[in-house]
Amino acid sequence: MTSSMSTRLRLVKLGISGLILAVVLLAGARDAAAYPQFQFSSGTNRCGQCHYSPAGGGLLTSWGRDESADTISMGGDGAFLHGLLSTPSWLGIGGDFRFAFLENDVGSPEGTEFAAFPMQADVYGRAAINDSWSINATIGVRGIVRPSDNSIGGRIGAAGGDIMSREHYLMWRPSATGPYARVGRFFAPFGLRFVEHVYYVRRYTGYDLYEETYNASAGYVAEDWEVHATLFAPPPRNAIELIAGTGPREAGFAGYGELRLAKTSAIAVQTRLGFGDLESRMTGGLVGKLWVDKAKILFLGEGDLIHQTFSTAAYSQNQFVSFLGADFYPARGIMAGVAYERFQENLGVSRTGRNAYDIQLNVFPWAHCEAVLLGRYQLTGAGAIDGGTASLVMLQLHYYL
């Protein structure tokens, strides 16, 4: 290939990447969560190998970028912008962009809802001050499924007021393993940390959309085990839109400890104690993963007991939330999963539970690109808040920098 042809090819690739970015930047922010399904199944022992965050999630390291191309996707170059542009060693840049199409049936008199909407536009940045200290930040656009003006012009016009930073923190981490500490805004390490926030183990444990807290966190990461301890508090009252959060206004402590065995399994214990003006929650649970190499199946599970107290009503209740799933990897670039979920709103009252059955197909045809098809069916007991059944079918198109 001549040098001129090579140059033109690089320009075409750069133009395609720019076009993709221009389209997906109309999206709405979701979560900088990780893919717990890739621990063990990709040959990676711990989530912190692929991400700068000690517990996983967010911006990918060079190792994570290589893995995304060499073991997770069907091919391609996992480097920033497909290797077309290199960045200095002290600077890390990335992003996640998603567009979604959904069919949602919750038994509404208006019938089934159909929607196509930009779902996520997050840009990640990391600047290393020296070999031990770094500044990390995530900037995105707050996602809205049903805006008042759904036109492209309307979304662009409203995007300026919806810009937010869900993560921004200062971190001390001398090496990939060993001690670390960080202070700022992020999700405290806890649970399976799925990308999909609709899962009960995220939705009902304080890890739903925009529920990131301000934290002082420290821990230790070894090859076969890790521990994390976090003191957390909600964003300031009447905070500006850039850092505004949602969910219960709790302050407290979160702890997570994981032991990995033979590079094929992990078991973790966790706790979260959140205290607020209106309610408090004390949570304790277990997390487990098991990789069966011959069958190419990863089993994942989480179960949490929650004691919830309402101070204004002098009332308390016990809850249970769980996830049990299995993901199958029939070929490179394909992941198919099934799962069962359970949330019992009050263990002392019958028919206050809900069950969900999930099926999901993830296809990674090329590095940086993913298509996700998710089907979800929910059953709630008679007398439950939601009542009846609900179903969701969603197609996501995902591109990451």
Image (cartoon, rainbow, N blue to C red):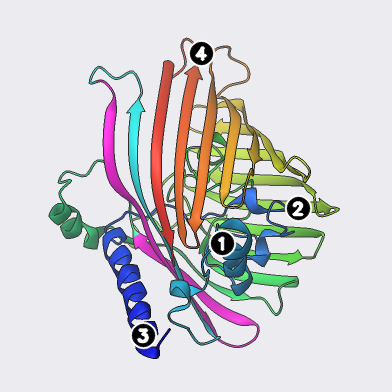
| For discs 3 and 2, the disc positioned in front in the rendered view | 3
Give the amino acid at mark 3.
Thr
Residues in magenta, as a range: 111-140
Disc on the earlier residue, 3 or 4: 3
Q: Are marks 4 and 1 in contact (CB under 8 Å)?
A: no
Disc on the earlier residue, 1 or 2: 1
Give the amino acid at mark 4.
Gly
Give the amino acid at mark 2.
Gly
| Visible residue check, residue 144 | no
Question: For the residue carrying disc 2, how many other residues have a C-alpha within 10 Å: few (<14), some (14-19), or many (20+)?
Answer: many
237 w.r.t. 67: above or below: above
| For discs 3 and 4, the disc positioned in front in the rendered view | 3
Q: Position of residue 307 (x, y in %)?
A: 63, 32
| For discs 4 and 1, the disc positioned in front in the rendered view | 4
Instruction: Give the residue furthest to the front.
Output: 1
How far apart are the two marked residues, 4 and 2, measured between alpha carbons? 34 Å
How far apart are the two marked residues, 1 and 2, measured between alpha carbons? 18 Å
SS for dot 3 = helix
Position of residue 5 in the picture relative to residue 169 (left or right): left
Q: Are marks 3 and 1 in contact (CB under 8 Å)?
A: no
Q: Position of residue 376 (x, y in %)?
A: 47, 29
Q: Position of residue 188 (x, y in %)?
A: 59, 56
Magenta residues: mostly which secondary structure? Answer: strand
Residue identifier under label 1:
215
Position of residue 45 in the picture relative to residue 276 (left or right): right
Residue identifier under label 3:
7
- Identity of the residue drawn at 54% across and 12% down: 351
Disc on the earlier residue, 3 or 1: 3
Residue identifier under label 2:
257
Q: Which sits in the foreground, 201 or 262? A: 262
Residue identifier under label 4:
381
